[in-house]
Image (cartoon, rainbow, N blue to C red):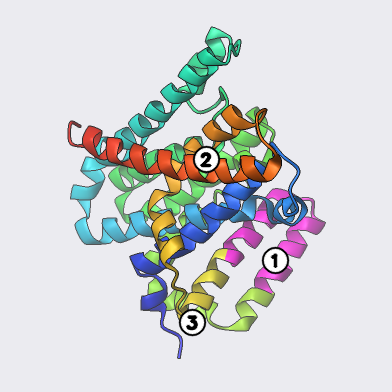
Amino acid sequence: MMNFKRALDKEQTTCINGMFVVLVFLSHFGQYERMPWNKPILAIGQLMVAPFLFFSGYGIMEQIKKKGDEYIDHMPRKRIFKFYIHFCMALCIYLLLSFLLDKDYSLSRIIWSFTALSSIGNSNWYVFAILVMYIIVYISFKYFKKNGITSCAIMSILYIILMKAFKGQDWWYNIILCFPAGMILSKYKDKVCSIIRKPIFFVCMFILALVLYIFHLHIFAYEVIAISLCFLIVDICAYKEIKNDLFQFLGQYVFEIYILQRVSMIIFKRYFHEWIYFLICIVVTFGLAYVFKKLETKIDMLI
């Protein structure tokens, strides 16, 4: 019997995020060194980040359902500002690193990096996407309360159009609809779960993606594939609980691992054999993530 309540509880979604953050780490490491997993990881592409957006959207909608206007009113300070401060804290590490390694970044690039639209060695597109989605949620539920999710979906599509025009690279926007999809799952949980448990749902999604691809709407076809993957993960977890202490632990440090992993990859690339380099990056990244999380907690108490 499928248990969707178990599949969507925080412990289970944290474990899934932990699994996918490992894939992200392997993917980013493959940009610095040739490894056996590079081709398979490359084939997964942006899909490995889709669950983060999906479960983030789901989690925010769960909070809105529980706390209502109170949650929305506190969102600028407790969600958006805190997340941005955490990003700036990490960015300062990259600034220090660029100084120590004599990286010659222009002042304009450094300034733009604090918007997450540019980079000084750090990963940035996901940070920008999350910040925008948080702002979209706040505007939608503050000013369009009864049509909050509809507003989120419409503004997410506008985000895709704008980012395609100004950024061009697909990864800035090609899985963004996973966020409102997660919100929809939370809002209409019983109805959505009764639909996604049927194989015909995934057949229809495949056909939809194919039609969009035929009509050269490749980005939206990819969005459909990404959303389908997220719903498939929910189905799998509803059928069989996925438990792993390591992934459970790593799932609590998704942002920290994501934003700090390139620090060790940049520092140690020139010094070690590929497998020693890989092991050092694992240890340093996870150590940094743990310490950084502690620092974030202390900073949060001051905000």
Helix, strand or loop status at disc 1 = helix
Q: Earlier in the sequence, mark 2 or mark 3?
A: 2
The crowd level at tag 2 (other Cα within 10 Å; few <14, some 14-19, many 20+) is many
Q: Earlier in the sequence, mark 1 or mark 3?
A: 1
Q: Which residue is mark 3?
A: 240
Q: Determine whether 255 is above or below 60 in the image.
A: above
Contact between labelled residues 1 and 2, with CB atoms less than 8 Å apart? no
Front disc: 2 or 1: 2
Residue in front for this viewpoint, 246 or 84: 246
Position of residue 171 measured from the top left corner of the image (x, y, whole percent): 64, 42
Position of residue 141 measured from the top left corner of the image (x, y, whole percent): 32, 48
- Per the rendered image, the range of residues in magenta is 204-229
Q: Determine whether 260 is above or below 25 in the image.
A: above
Question: Does the segment drawn in magenta span residue 116?
Answer: no
Disc assigned to residue 126: 2
Helix, strand or loop status at disc 3 = loop
Question: Does the segment drawn in magenta span residue 224?
Answer: yes
Q: Residue at x 52, y 79 (%)?
A: 195
Residue in front for this viewpoint, 148 or 117: 117
Q: Residue at x 36, y 77 (%)?
A: 5
Q: Which residue is mark 1?
A: 208
Q: How many marks?
A: 3
Q: Amino acid at mark 2?
A: Tyr
Q: Is residue 181 visible?
A: no
Q: Is residue 110 visible?
A: yes
